[in-house]
């Protein structure tokens, strides 16, 4: 069974440029999560989708961040414009359904460096 | 509000020694508790989780953790460390918020385990 796929794995951009990350969850997983992981920190939830609906985006900085999950399968997270402080690892995870005791399956992440 | 505290951002043990990684949580409702491991340049992988029932939970790679409600702890142990255990370990908690009916994973800041030969 294929795991969670993320691309690109690494991205270097200059500040004020836009950037997009893509995630393909495990087949059949209805719930998709985007996390931000700063160096030396644990993941912090940005947004959670149940199918195509964003059910928790309270931590997503909506002035510059946006996300979509068309058709309830793969998802894209966008930053426009990027700032120096956005340098971090962006993790995508998926789970079967939206219950709190479920295991989340993580992708390898996209490491973003903003210069 | 729930939170997770991992004591010790770095832990070093000798190969073959006991591994003990500490995790304390705070939650206003019964929690679900998780330990994840992250190897360099990889995503997080579940080691074990506590949902209900037996408070001693066994996971992969010989790890186990005990849920102690009175101490609000969920410490991770392994009797004998192996070089391949060197990684970063994250404790996480989720609770269902009764007001909104939503839940959220809260991760600790992580403990980096170093295994000395």
Image (cartoon, helix red, strand yellow):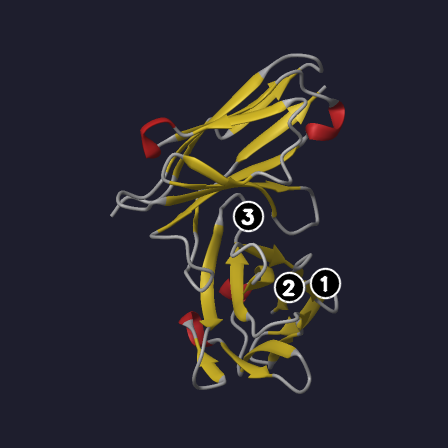
Q: Position of residue A98 (x, y in %)?
A: 41, 53
Q: Residue at x 61, y 57 (%)?
A: B106
Looking at the image, do the residues carrying marks 2 and 1 touch, with CB atoms under 8 Å apart? yes
Sequence-wise, the earlier of marks 3 and 1 is 1
Circles 3 and 1 on the same subunit? yes
Q: Give the left or right position of residue B1, taking residue B95 as reference.
A: right
Check disc 2 and report the residue beneath it: B114
Q: Is residue A75 above or below residue A37?
A: above
- Residue A65 point in image, percent of width and height: 61, 25
Q: Quadrant of residue B115?
A: bottom right
Question: Do residues under tags 2 and 3 come within 8 Å of each other at their CB atoms?
Answer: no
Camera-nearest residue between B11 and A11: A11
**Residue to which mark 3 is pinned:** B40
Chain of residue at mark 3: B
- Callout 2: 10 Å neighbours few (<14), some, many (20+)? many
Q: Are marks 2 and 3 on the same chain?
A: yes
Q: Element type at marker 1? A: strand
Q: On the image, numbered disc 1 is attached to which residue?
A: B10
């Amino acid at each position: 069974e294929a795991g969670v796929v993320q691309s690109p794995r690494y991205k270097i951009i200059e500040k004020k440029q836009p950037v997009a990350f893509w995630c393909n969850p495990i087949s059949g997983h209805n719930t998709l999560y985007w996390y931000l992981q700063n160096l030396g920190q644990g993941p912090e939830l940005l947004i959670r989708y149940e199918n195509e609906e964003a059910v928790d985006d309270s931590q997503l900085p909506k002035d510059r961040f946006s996300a979509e999950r068309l058709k309830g399968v793969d998802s894209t997270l966008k930053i426009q414009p990027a700032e120096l402080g956005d340098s971090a690892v962006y993790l995508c995870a998926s789970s079967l359904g939206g219950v709190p005791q479920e295991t989340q399956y993580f992708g390898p992440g996209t490491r973003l460096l903003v210069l | 509000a729930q939170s997770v505290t991992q004591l010790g951002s770095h832990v070093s043990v000798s190969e073959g020694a006991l591994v003990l990684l500490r995790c304390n949580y705070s939650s206003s409702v019964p929690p679900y508790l998780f330990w994840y491991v992250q190897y360099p340049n990889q995503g997080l992988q579940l080691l074990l989780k506590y949902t209900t029932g037996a408070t001693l939970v066994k996971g992969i790679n010989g790890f186990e953790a005990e849920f102690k409600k009175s101490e609000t702890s969920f410490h991770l142990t392994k009797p004998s460390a192996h070089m391949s255990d060197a990684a970063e370990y994250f404790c996480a908690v989720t609770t269902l918020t009764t007001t909104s009916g939503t839940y959220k994973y809260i991760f600790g800041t992580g403990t980096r385990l170093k295994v000395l030969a």
